[in-house]
Image: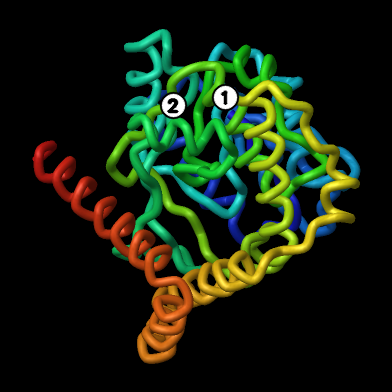
């Protein structure tokens, strides 16, 4: 498994503890230090477990760090985990069982809990079923990342064959990789929470919303062209020519307000969160209702799985 590390000293200890507590114990843990200036790499190196190795290098970005880990990986299955997220103990064992039960499955994700900065578990969850026909087409067209990157495991050779992570588009490289993996085979989701995805103000999705919107549309254009056998646009030409339509700006604003509402709700600021959610609903009713419905669907599916297990 691969953990890119950049100035996350306060989280790496909990992250690695969650990895080492997995019920699946046959692990190769590759921590790729991406030019950190804090003590995170030293913390990882100080853990007395021979399964962990730390690779230090200059700062080149999260996609380059993941690709470096992919170059070093020796296992048939590779997993990715951001240094500020955590896994629950049965995470790998459940996903590996899905991957090994069907040769057509190339990648498996999972529902994750949203975590606040201090790591407290919340009722909010993220992730959706990736196996229905609509989800698969949306993935192939670069329109859907159905679960957090930290939940992803995949067949190592399929990730390498797909080209790994595109280092020119780090904010959406996971979306881009998923589009290529979905062309190679089936993608599945374990529909119960198997980890925690930490939300905080330094997260890339919070810091770079406008850039992410532009690059996400580039991924969609390129993936759709690939799927339909047309020439794909190059990044520089697309970005220089891209001008969002009025409808896209309205949708982007609604998406940002919905995301901000979720962040505020996580912090217990429900009045402001409700206001932003109402603004998102007014701007893009169908989009916002679909997001709310997807959230409730995940909650129901996760509760049903948990009830069945008990």
Q: Earlier in the sequence, mark 1 or mark 2?
A: 1
Quarter of the image with the C terminus is: top left
Q: Are marks 1 and 2 in contact (CB under 8 Å)?
A: yes
Q: Indicate the colouring scheme.
A: rainbow
Question: For this rendering, which residue is in front, 159 or 249?
Answer: 249
- Circle 1 Cα neighbour tier, 10 Å, few/some/many (<14 / 14–19 / ≥20): many
Q: Which residue is mark 2?
A: 187
Residue 167 percent across, percent down from the top left: 80, 39
| Residue 255, visible in the rendered structure | yes
| Percent position of residue 178, x then y | 57, 33
Q: Quadrant of residue 143?
A: top right
Q: Nearer the viewer, residue 100 or 187?
A: 187
Residue behind mark 1: 181
Q: Quadrant of residue 277?
A: bottom left
Q: Decide if residue 254 is on the left or right side of residue 245.
A: left
Residue drawn at point x = 90 percent, y = 46 percent: 236
Q: Is residue 46 visible?
A: no
Q: Is residue 298 left or right of residue 251?
A: left
Q: Is residue 101 above or below residue 135?
A: above
User: Horizontal placement of 108 versus 155: left or right?
Assistant: left
Q: Secondary structure at mark 2?
A: strand
**Labels in figure, total:** 2
Q: Nearer the viewer, residue 180 or 7?
A: 180
Residue pictured at 63% horizontal, 61% vertical = 205
Check disc 1 and report its element: helix, strand or loop: helix
- Name the residue rendered at 19%, 52% in the picture: 300
User: Quadrant of the image for the N terminus?
Assistant: top right
């Amino acid at each position: 498994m691969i953990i890119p590390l950049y100035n996350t000293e306060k989280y790496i200890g909990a992250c690695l503890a969650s990895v080492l507590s997995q019920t699946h114990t046959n692990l190769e843990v590759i921590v790729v230090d991406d030019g950190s200036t804090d003590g995170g790499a030293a913390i990882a190196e100080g853990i007395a477990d021979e399964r962990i190795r730390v690779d230090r290098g200059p700062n080149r970005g999260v996609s380059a760090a993941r690709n470096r880990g992919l170059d070093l990986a020796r296992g048939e299955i590779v997993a990715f985990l951001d240094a500020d997220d955590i896994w629950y103990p049965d995470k790998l064992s459940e996903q590996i069982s899905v991957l090994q039960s069907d040769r057509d499955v190339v990648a498996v994700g999972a529902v994750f809990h949203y975590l606040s900065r201090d790591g407290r578990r919340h009722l909010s969850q993220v992730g959706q079923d990736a196996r229905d026909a609509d989800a698969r087409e949306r993935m192939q067209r670069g329109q859907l990342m159905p679960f957090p990157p930290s939940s992803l495991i995949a067949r190592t050779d399929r990730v390498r064959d797909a080209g790994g992570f595109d280092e020119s588009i780090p904010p959406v490289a996971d979306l881009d990789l998923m589009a290529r993996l979905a062309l190679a085979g089936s993608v599945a989701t374990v529909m119960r929470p198997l980890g925690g995805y930490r939300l905080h103000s330094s997260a890339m999705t919070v810091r770079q919303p406008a850039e992410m919107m532009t690059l996400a549309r580039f991924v969609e254009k390129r993936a759709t062209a690939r799927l339909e056998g047309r020439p794909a646009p190059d990044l520089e030409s697309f970005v220089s020519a891209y001008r969002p339509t009025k409808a896209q700006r309205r949708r982007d604003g609604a998406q940002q307000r919905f995301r901000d509402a979720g962040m505020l709700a996580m912090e217990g600021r429900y009045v402001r969160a409700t206001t932003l959610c109402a603004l998102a609903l007014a701007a893009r009713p169908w989009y916002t209702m679909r997001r709310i419905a997807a959230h409730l669907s995940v909650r129901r599916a996760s509760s049903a799985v948990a009830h069945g297990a008990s």
